[in-house]
Image: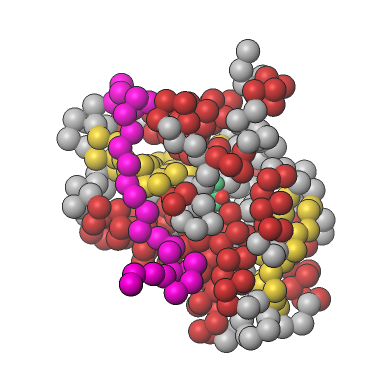
Amino acid sequence: MEYANNILETIGNTPLIKLNKLTAELPCLVLAKYETFNPGNSVKDRMALQMVEDAEAAGVLKPGGTIIEGTSGNTGMGLALAAVVKGYRMICVISDKQSKEKIDILKAVGSEVHVCPTDVAPDDPRSYYSTARRLATEIPNSWYVNQYDNPSNTKAHYLSTGPEIWEQTDGKVTHFVVGVGTGGTISGVGTYLKEKNPNIKVWGVDTYGSVFKKYHETGIFDENEIYPYITEGIGEDILPENVRFDIIDGFTKVTDKDAAVYTQRLAKEEGMFLGNSAGAAIKGLLQLKEHFTKDDVVVVLFHDHGSRYVGKMFNDDWMREKGFIE
Ligand code: PMP
């Protein structure tokens, strides 16, 4: 018999899938690391499990404990799966920008959810960063995960996602393109790939309204770069410790409209029903067209599943209301 002992054992080993129509204008092979095949439907299952197991090993997460995290949903899902299997209480603190589907899904897997306003500064006591920290001081035997600065986030991708991409491409990967939020994915995969072959180029996809691109190019944290935006999962108004700017070759910014339109196009033209950051990632990759030549093997990572966006990017009324389609 061949079976997994629990759902956590099915995390990772996701397929690499060739893009065909959307990338027809490019000279190179484009392969998508398809992370929705994880049990929580996103790449975040990997780092959630790594963070929990490292916290257990370090003795900061103890039996009967409570896991607390400020999360836009996918990390919460991964943590919730680990909490269910391992027997912890799970509290997710989430911003009100996130889709209702994401909140309902977290509750479905047994998580408690606190919703906080998006349009306040990170150090405002109402922000989701501050609320998560406060709950962790108030609730006994609790552990605040802090995916932004927790090194186990990057480590998960260094130990699993990076090696998988290297092996699946027989070491032929030349470029890695990925949306950046906490930075765990780009830093872990990018560090691993560059150790294997320092010529591999690592590109981050950023949003308008986020600080990453300007900071990478100038070293300046420019508050003028910060304003509300619609794209979910990528871009930040802080500099997480998990973003290793030194291993990133460059950032490209994608508009909210392009990210939304390309999320629809992935589904309609490739049969890839994915989240909003996948639309941003593929549009960012297309913007980098002049960097690619015939023999290149470009890997793009798609973070999560389309089901969490049915009320938004996959709803034409919502798309029209935002001015993203006619
Ligand atoms: N896309 C989605 C949908 C996400 O949830 C996240 C995590 N915030 C990202 C992209 C960015 O990944 P990372 O945090 O590893 O940079």
Residue 197, quarter of the rendered image: bottom left
Let me know if residue 276 appears in the view.
yes
Q: Residue furthest front?
A: 1
Left or right for 48, reference 94:
left
Image height of 53 relative to 188, above or below = below
Residue at the image point whose x is 58% and y is 34% from the top: 208
Residue at the image point whose x is 62% and y is 38% from the top: 309
Left or right for 188, reference 49:
left
Residue 125, quarter of the rendered image: bottom right
Residue 198: x and y in percent read 24, 53
Dividing the image into 4 quarters, which one contains the C terminus? top right
Residue at the image point whose x is 56% and y is 62% from the top: 78
Residue at the image point whose x is 36% and y is 63% from the top: 160
Let me know if residue 287 appears in the view.
no
Q: Is residue 97 magenta?
A: no
Residue range highlighted in magenta: 1-26
